[in-house]
Image (cartoon, rainbow, N blue to C red):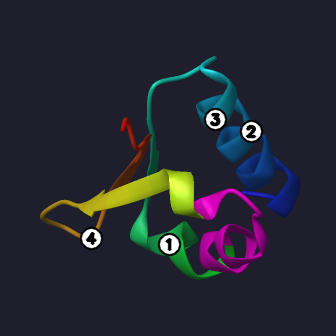
Amino acid sequence: MAEQDFKQQLDDLRSGKIDHFEITPDDFQEFQQVYHAYPYRTQIEGKADIGGKVTYHLIHR
């Protein structure tokens, strides 16, 4: 998956267009680079599942 796709998923999550998205172990390293550069990452939380898949969602406070 391309970096732009990861950023778009983060933007869509933050804007409410989607309520979650999943990252597979194969995409995790590439996604982490985009995630750590994302200015609103403190509003997004990931939960690891069995098998290495991580589901990201917006933190509701």
Residue ID at (44%, 34%): 20
Instruction: Look at the numbered disc 3 and give the secondary structure of its residue.
Output: helix
**Residue nearest the observer in this picture, 17 or 5:** 17
Residue ID at (69%, 25%): 15
- How far separated are the C-alphas under marks 3 and 4? 23 Å
Magenta range is 31-41
Q: Nearer the viewer, mark 3 or mark 4?
A: 3
Label 4 CA crowd tier, 10 Å (few <14, some 14–19, many 20+): few
Instruction: Look at label 3 and name its amino acid.
Output: Arg
Label 2 CA crowd tier, 10 Å (few <14, some 14–19, many 20+): some
Q: Which residue is mark 3?
A: 14
In the rendering, which numbered label is found on residue 11? 2
- How far separated are the C-alphas under marks 2 and 1? 21 Å
Pointer 3 and pointer 2: residues touching (CB < 8 Å)?
yes
Q: Which residue is mark 4?
A: 52
Q: Nearer the viewer, mark 1 or mark 3?
A: 3
